[in-house]
Image (cartoon, rainbow, N blue to C red):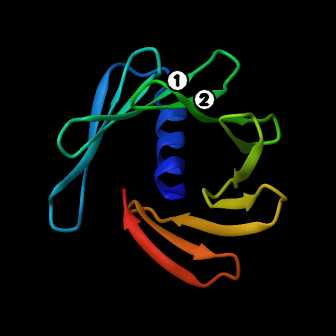
Amino acid sequence: MKRILLTLAILVISTSIAFCSTTTSYDKNGNKTGSYKTSSSGTVTSYDKYGNKTGTYKSSSSGKVTSYDKYGNKTGSFKTGSNGVTTSYDKYGNKTGSYKTSSNGTVTSYDKYGNKTGTYKSNSSGKVTSYDKYGNKTGSFKK
């Protein structure tokens, strides 16, 4: 779930000025697992593999992104500060964690208390490898 949220966060931030587009995700066997549609306003709507709406992510002018379930109920939010740290909040506004992207593209995640929980590193071919808080490889996926 954190990996999906992180991917969506990056998608929302990087496409907030882009025009309407759809991105479809597939499993390792080529089966459709879902899709994301980005509007010109920066709103991202996610769908399951059958095309059913699963959630929405809306950007505000302050840079805050708020997530909603398929019924429109607020489920959480996140915002990137001037220090480059993105902090996530639950639907009540309580801090749930944060992550920071370094200049080399490595993303480090932290729990709500600031303890390191993991790292994600991308290579030039788009492969992302995840590591636990101790630096042990836990998996990988290709963008």
Per the rendering, the mark at residue 20 is none
Read off the residue under disc 2: 65
Question: Is label 1 in a helix, a strand or a loop?
Answer: strand
Identify the mark nearer the N-term, 2 or 1: 1
Residue located 39% across and 31% down the image: 70
Pick the residue in front: 131 or 33.
Answer: 33
- Name above or below for residue 23 compared with residue 107: above
Which part of the image, by quadrant, shows the C terminus?
bottom left
x and y, in percent, of residue 135 in the image: 66, 81
Q: Residues within 10 Å of mark 1 (few under 14, many from 20)?
A: many
Read off the residue under disc 1: 58
Q: Amino acid at mark 2?
A: Val
x and y, in percent, of residue 81 in the image: 78, 35
Q: Is the C-beta separation of discs 2 and 1 under 8 Å? A: yes
Q: Amino acid at mark 1?
A: Lys
x and y, in percent, of residue 82 in the image: 81, 34
